[in-house]
Amino acid sequence: MKDNQNESELIKAKVVDINNHVIDFISIDYKLLSKVIHQATFLFVIEKQTFRIFCHKRSQSKQYQPGTFSTCFTGIVLETEDYRQCAKRKLIQETGLDLELTYINSFYFESKKNKIWGQIFYTFYDGQIINFIQDPKEVEEIELMSYKEIVIREQNGEIFTPESIQALHFLNKRVLRQ
């Protein structure tokens, strides 16, 4: 192995076809991933009493949509894991929490920047946000927002990752019902 080989070149993501069947593996690099359909998880952490969502601002060091808000914690499914394992890994990595996850559904998302087969999960959490951010390379800040607040903020020009907004609408139909 070359000394200058990037760690992301060693970690592979699943490349899938339009029917979500694995057809290849590819290095986790935004420029490469933006050209293929890949798998990702969308994990919502919901405050149990108020049904507000723990949204977060993506780190400025992220390759994809740095500094924008996301309604959920997302992760690219690695070649050695399934969707649920990925969601669990991201929950622990980005929040430090190890909680039960509930599956909602799968969906396909496509934009000029991304092609994803995603699965949506959620969990409830009633603890404090203090020390919630575990990895500043992933998450800059966390803010509790209601579904309606997210919709209004997006309508007023605040930028959220578009796939997280699509996943949010599925969450609202199935869980929040606001």
Image (cartoon, grey):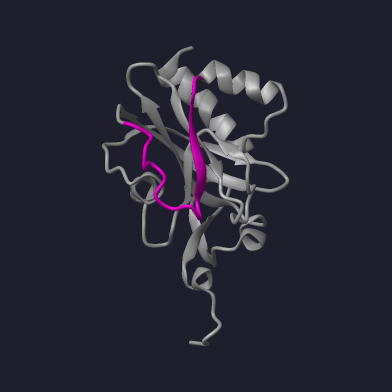
Q: Quadrant of residue 103?
A: top left
Q: In this view of the protein, which residue sits in the foreground, 57 or 87? A: 57
Q: Which residue does the image show at 52% across and 64% down from the upper left? A: 24
Q: In this view of the protein, which residue sits in the foreground, 107 or 170? A: 170
Q: Quadrant of residue 148?
A: top right
Give the main secondary structure of the magenta stretch.
loop
Magenta region, residue range:
128-146
Where does residue 159 sit, x and y in percent of width and height? Answer: 67, 34
Q: Which residue does the image show at 54% across and 80% down from the upper left? A: 5
Q: In this view of the protein, which residue sits in the foreground, 56 or 82? A: 56
Q: Quadrant of residue 51?
A: top left
From what the image shows, is residue 31 above or below residue 108? below
Q: In this view of the protein, which residue sits in the foreground, 101 or 50? A: 50
* Residue at the limit of the structure toward the bottom, as seen here: 2
Q: Which residue does the image show at 30% across and 42% down from the upper left? A: 97
Where does residue 149 sit, x and y in percent of width and height? Answer: 57, 19
